[in-house]
Structure formats: structure tokens, C-alpha cells
Amino acid sequence: KFYCKDTFPLQEIHSYSMLEGWLIRISATNMIYIDPVAGEPPLVEGDIAASKITDPCTSRGCLWNKWSDGVYIPYYIANQNGSCPVVLRGLESFSGFSCIRFRPYQSGDYERLSIESRDGCWSYVGRQGGGQIVSLSRQGCIYHSTVQHELLHLGFNHEQTRSDDNHIQVVWNNILDEMKHNFNKIATLNQGNSYDHNSAMQYHRTAFSKNGLPTMVPIPNSSVSFGQATQMNKNDIDRLNRLYKC
Ligand SMILES: [Zn+2]
């Protein structure tokens, strides 16, 4: 039985720049080093781990089973130390606005999320079958918005990759070469839910910038703020409920 045993104060650690699974270091001579986190599954899109499902959640098998009273997703939290309450709060938030119920792992559960403090914040997209890791590093990922973001990858991709995205202009010249693939459009399942600049799945204005200048500009009003979500908003919740027919 799982319980939040440790309640040490949270540490704020920002000794280096880490954006969703990538360690970005800039030297005194302005050399930029970007490292995917070592020893982890290859990451294909920032914080999305490569999976056998290429077009998640437009494919069969992406979703967890739904029972008459909800969708139960077992989880196990490993080596989180002081971050446990924040992770739990993120997990439990889903039951307040959807039919998704994260529940503690019990022996015999074949499918489960293993929530671990690995290097960076990352997740697979969709259900993988068996155990699957969601990484929430104690260094840089322990925020309510980040926990919700990584859990939303269990059904969704990033907002700026949406197939119907004519709401963001990508400024390719400002993006680190190695990271340009993060901004490609993909065949997402949009379910009639509109683009939302303030979705929890929207990257921020200078994400993966090589020069500090914006990598994305919102359309039509280029000056509105975006990518600042502190939690899932109405659209995030609506599309989750549509996906699972809650
Ligand atoms: Zn992400």
C-alpha cells in the first residue's frame, strides 16, 4: 500500500537549464551543449519517449480500459523523496474534473505507471502496455503544472505540434538545430477541440531557443502571453473528457 511517507521541504533547484528531458548547458564562451538524458529511452520530441505507437491516440490501444464508473490507472511512485505530495496532488487532480482515476498499484496489476525521479521530465504518449515510466526528476519537475503536463502525455502531444495549428508561427531561425523537430506538425487527434495558447501542453515563447529570442509567435495577436499554464485549463480538461468519453 502506498503512502506519502516523506515530507521534506521541496527544494528549488535550477543550477542548469533543463527543459523536459534535455539538459542544456551554455559555457562561458557561449558554446551550447545539449544532451539527451543518459541511460533513458530515446526521446523523440522534447519530453516524449519513443514508443512503439507512432501516432498515439489515433491508434488502437492508446487508451486505458474504461469501466462503468471510470478509468483506473495504477501508479507506483518510486524514489521521489520530498516531492511525493506534489506528485500525488497532480495525480489526484484528475479525479476532480474527469473520469480518470489514478490509483495505487496493487500486486497483480499488469499495466501501471512507474513514476520515478530520472533525469528530466518525460513520458510516453499513450498507454504502452505493462509498466511504463513517467519521469519526474526531483531537480526541476516538481511543479503541479509539470506533473499534469507529463500525465497529459498519456493521451496528448504538445500543442504546437497540432495538425490544425495555424495559431502559432514557428521562428525556425531561433531554434537550436537539434531541437527543430519539436516544432514539426504531426497527425494529432484534435477531437473538435480548438487550439489553446494556454494549454498545459503548449511550450513557452522561448522554448529551445538558441539565442534567447522567441521560437514561437502567437497568431493573430503576437503580443499575447502563452505557454504559461500553471495547471490544466478548460480546454485541456474538455479534450481529456472527450478522449475518454467521460
Ligand atoms: Zn511535454
Image (cartoon, rainbow, N blue to C red):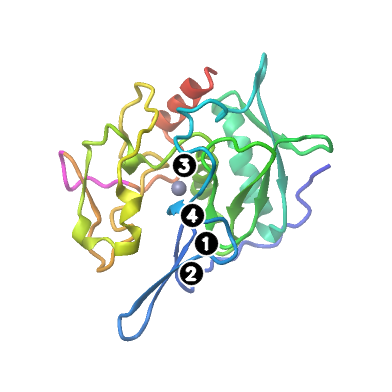
Q: CA distance from mark 4 to mark 1?
A: 18 Å
Residue of label 3? 231
Asked if marks 4 and 2 touch (Cβ < 8 Å), the reply is no
In the picture of the structure, the residue carrying the numbered disc 1 is 140
Q: Residues within 10 Å of mark 3 (few under 14, many from 20)?
A: many
The span picked out in magenta is: 220-226
Q: Earlier in the sequence, mark 4 or mark 2?
A: 2
Disc 2 crowd rating (10 Å Cα; few below 14, some 14-19, many 20+) is: few
User: Which mark sits nearer the N-terminus, 3 or 2?
Assistant: 2
Q: Which residue sits at x=68%, y=59%?
A: 82
Q: Is residue 131 left or right of residue 206?
A: right
In front: 87, or 23? Answer: 23
Q: Nearer the viewer, residue 166 or 91?
A: 166
- The mark lying in front, picked from 4 and 3, is 4
**Viewer-side label of 4, 2:** 4
* Comes first in the chain, label 4 or label 1: 4
- Spatial separation of the CA atoms under disc 2 and disc 1: 7 Å
Mark 2 = which residue?
14
Q: Which mark is residue 43?
A: 4
Do the numbered discs 2 and 1 sit on residues whose CB atoms are within 8 Å? yes
Relative placement, left or right, of 192 versus 172 is: right
Disc 4/disc 3 C-alpha distance (Å): 24 Å
The amino acid type found where label 1 is placed reads: Gly
Asked which quadrant contains residue 111, the reply is: top right
What secondary structure is the magenta-colored segment mainly? loop
Q: Quadrant of the C terminus?
A: top right
Type of amino acid under label 3: Gln
Q: Are marks 4 and 3 in contact (CB under 8 Å)?
A: no
* Image coordinates for residue 84, horizontal then vertical, percent: 68, 52
